[in-house]
């Protein structure tokens, strides 16, 4: 390698010079997509890469939020049956107690899955607002999450601390779901400023320990 | 924790091991992919796809190469696919096979800055040349790593690099002497 090669090599370092990797945002999206995907896709299926243009970044969230809602509905059905079958309770109190405990565990799992999804979603939302690329799908995803949130908030048996967090989260989701695509960037930023002021992401992270899977195996 | 321990923990279903693997490799992969595709959104998608695929396929990793090299191979594959899609969409198909084909001369560059001129010439390199040049001379990968990641012989990587440098020298030597 001669002097010219050295000079070219030095100048080439400025070619497509990478910024710092947006670690947390990318990790959040990876987790979101994995949470929305089947647990173990068959290996025989060929790998299909995503489209290069990330237009549907939030689409996985819609599916994921819907999954939690379904879980919530399943729990709701389970818990709503109990009062309508008193004779069963009277004659078989032990199995009924086990059933109630199972419902509480499932409800707790659903709440935590919802909180994890919301945390990832809000991280993503905040990052897109900061980069000035708020996606219209963000609003529809907030509506999906809001539906899950309302259901879980209204369910009896939710831990009071988690319920308080759910209610605060609900306000944020309501704010986002009322945004319109034509709204000014300032309107979006107001929401993210509110998120930061309330320490919402920190609270969500505290409520959902890192590394926990969004759904415990076998709940659904 | 070494690669094998990390992989064993991931295979055992430990999510914190997945995050550890991500943290250990994400910056290097992002740099590599960004160098090649040059667009933040595309680079992020490629890196995300890389890790999703890696977590799905970690059971297939046999340890024939370093974990970082295996991840790099997936990332390079994602970057090539993304770039080819982009070129196809813009009607400018570029493949590994056209590595021998000379790029058509462009009109004289208005900006006389050497760096800007160099970047244009790098952009115009055939795909294979450009990838090897960026991996070796810019990001510092060895020919062995490049060979594994690109699925080519080490000698091919060396030859591609030599030709890429020659091409750049040829296009820029007059400019440098001025």
Image (cartoon, coloured by chain):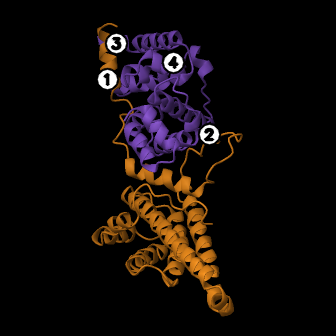
Q: Which mark is residue B89?
A: 2
Label 3 belongs to which residue? A5
Q: CA distance from mark 1 to mark 3?
A: 10 Å
Same subunit: marks 1 and 2: no
**Label 1 element class:** helix
Q: Which mark is residue B147?
A: 4
Residue B18 location (% of width, % of height): 45, 45
Residue B91 location (% of width, % of height): 63, 35
Is residue A119 positioned above or below B5 on the image? Answer: below
Label 1 belongs to which residue? A11
**Label 4 element class:** helix
In the image as oriented, which residue stretches furthest toward the top?
Answer: A2
**Residue found 54% across the figure and 33% down from its top:** B74
Same subunit: marks 4 and 3: no
Q: CA distance from mark 1 to mark 2?
A: 30 Å
Give the colour in which the image draws chain B: purple
**Residue found 66% across the figure and 89% down from its top:** A91
Q: CA distance from mark 4 to mark 2?
A: 29 Å
Instruction: Pinpoint the chain carrying mark 2.
Output: B
Q: Quadrant of residue A192?
A: bottom left
**Residue found 43% across the figure and 44% down from its top:** B17
Is residue B28 positioned above or below A31 on the image? Answer: above
Mark 4 or 2, nearer chain start:
2
């Amino acid at each position: 390698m001669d002097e010219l090669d050295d000079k070219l090599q030095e100048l080439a370092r400025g070619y497509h010079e990478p910024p710092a990797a947006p670690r947390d945002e990318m990790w959040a999206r990876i987790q979101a997509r994995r949470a929305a995907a089947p647990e173990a896709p068959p290996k025989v299926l060929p790998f299909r890469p995503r489209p290069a243009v990330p237009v549907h970044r939030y689409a996985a969230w819609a599916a994921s939020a819907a999954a939690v809602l379904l879980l919530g509905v399943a729990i709701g059905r389970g818990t709503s049956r109990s009062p309508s079958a008193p004779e069963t309770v009277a004659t078989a109190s032990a199995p009924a107690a086990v059933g109630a405990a199972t419902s509480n565990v499932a409800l707790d799992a659903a709440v935590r899955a919802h909180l994890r999804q919301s945390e990832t979603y809000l991280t993503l939302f905040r990052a897109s607002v900061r980069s000035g690329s708020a996606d219209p799908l963000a609003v529809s995803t907030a509506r999906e999450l809001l539906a899950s949130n309302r259901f879980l908030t209204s369910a009896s048996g939710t831990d009071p601390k988690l319920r308080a967090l759910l209610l605060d989260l609900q306000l944020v989701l309501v704010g986002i779901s009322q945004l319109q695509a034509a709204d000014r960037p300032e309107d979006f930023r107001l929401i993210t400023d509110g998120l930061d002021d309330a320490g919402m992401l920190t609270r969500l992270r505290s409520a959902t320990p890192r590394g926990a899977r969004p759904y415990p195996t076998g709940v659904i | 924790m070494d690669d094998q321990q990390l992989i064993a923990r991931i295979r055992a279903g430990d999510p914190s091991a997945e995050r550890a693997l991500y943290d250990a490799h994400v910056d290097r992969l992002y740099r590599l992919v960004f160098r090649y595709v040059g667009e933040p959104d595309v680079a992020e998608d490629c890196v995300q796809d890389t890790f999703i695929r890696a977590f799905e396929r970690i059971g297939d990793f046999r340890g024939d190469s370093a974990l970082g090299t295996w991840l790099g191979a997936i990332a390079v594959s994602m970057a090539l696919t993304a770039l080819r899609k982009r070129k196809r969409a813009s009607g400018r198909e570029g493949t590994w096979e056209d590595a021998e084909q000379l790029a058509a001369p462009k009109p004289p560059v208005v900006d006389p800055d050497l760096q800007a001129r160099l970047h244009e010439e790098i952009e115009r390199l055939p795909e294979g040349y450009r990838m090897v040049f960026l991996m070796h001379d810019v990001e510092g990968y060895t020919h062995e790593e490049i060979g594994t990641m690109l699925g080519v012989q080490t000698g091919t990587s060396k030859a591609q690099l030599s030709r890429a440098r020659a091409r750049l020298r040829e296009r820029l030597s007059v400019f440098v002497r001025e």
